[in-house]
Image: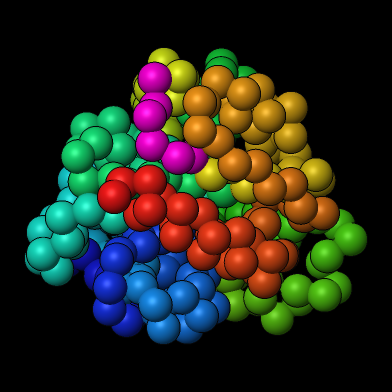
Amino acid sequence: KKIYYQTQGQGDTIVFLHGFLNSSVVWEYYLENLSENYQVIAVDLPGHGESENLAEVHPMDLMADAVCAVLDELLVKKCVMIGHSMGGYVMLNFAGRYSERVAGFGMINSTALPDGETAKENRLRVCEIVKNEKLNFVTSFIPELFAKENLAKFNVEIERLRGVASNISPQAIIAAQHGMINRESFVKFLEAAKNPVLFIGGHYDTRIPVEILLSQAMMVKNAEILLLPTGHMSHIEAHVEACIAIESFVKRCFVFQS
């Protein structure tokens, strides 16, 4: 099966993992601006972008193994990994299972908590909806990820993301939803984390409220926190600020390792 990725630049490695219904295109600004000093890799997670479906269900460990295969292909032994939303779940799984390959990691609008019962029920409803009404679901879902105050400002980006999401098959959407339903807690992993951890969140994020982000950041011995006036898409809604924070964080991670 094919797993697609973009890579640019040379040096210490940063890996970016996108969220649900997105693809590696959301990281183009970061590839362009960070590749002067780093090797930057952005992966299309299974079933998303140009990557193929791997199974009827895409558990987080299967997605993490796909990322691992990309790093093996590129001979990357250690990296800083940054994950947005679902990409953060995959990143935590990767960091938990391949800790020797991670110098530090960042969570953008993401959480170490598993789904609660209400979230699981909502995901199952999504699975039923996309079987017959995928385009209607995508059309309404993407704008809901942004803060209302930012909708007009990012209309071009929203339309582009709708196009990306429209090309994802119902089977891939369902596989990802079931994978997220079944994901485990990584709270204890965060509590024990020795490497630096970056948390980026949005004040207007209704999916991962600031209170959850702060409570998890307080568990980590070596944490950085950036709160932005954004919704669930902080890496797009405040891309300049997020990119600056990530570059500073990555530099500190590799100094910390040495």
Q: Residue at x 82, y 75 (%)?
A: 153
- Residue 256 falls within the magenta-colored stretch: no
Instruction: State the count of labels.
Output: 0
Closest to the observer, 32 or 4? 32
Q: Position of residue 59 (x, y in %)?
A: 29, 36
Residue 118 shows up from this direction: yes
Q: Nearer the viewer, residue 198 or 60?
A: 198
The residue at the far right in this view is 149
- Tell me what residue is drawn at x 74 percent, y 47 percent: 227
Q: Position of residue 248 (x, y in %)?
A: 54, 60
Q: Is residue 194 magenta?
A: yes
244 with respect to 66 (left or right) = right
Q: How is the image coloured?
A: rainbow
Range drawn in magenta: 192-197
Name the quadrant containing residue 104: top left
Q: Majority secondary structure of the magenta segment?
A: loop
Image side of residue 56 versus residue 212, left or right: left
Quarter of the rendering containing residue 41: bottom left
Task: Find residue 125 and report its horizontal and vertical position in percent.
Answer: 56, 34
* Residue 43 to residue 66: above or below: below
Q: Is residue 66 visible?
A: no
Residue 255 image position (x, y, % from top left) = 38, 53
Q: Quadrant of residue 244?
A: bottom right
Describe residue 9's horizontal placement relative to residue 208 as left or right.
left
Tell me what residue is drawn at x 67 percent, y 71 percent. 240
Query: What residue lies at 82% left-to-right and 54% top-to-bottom?
Result: 229
Image quarter in which the N terminus is found: bottom left
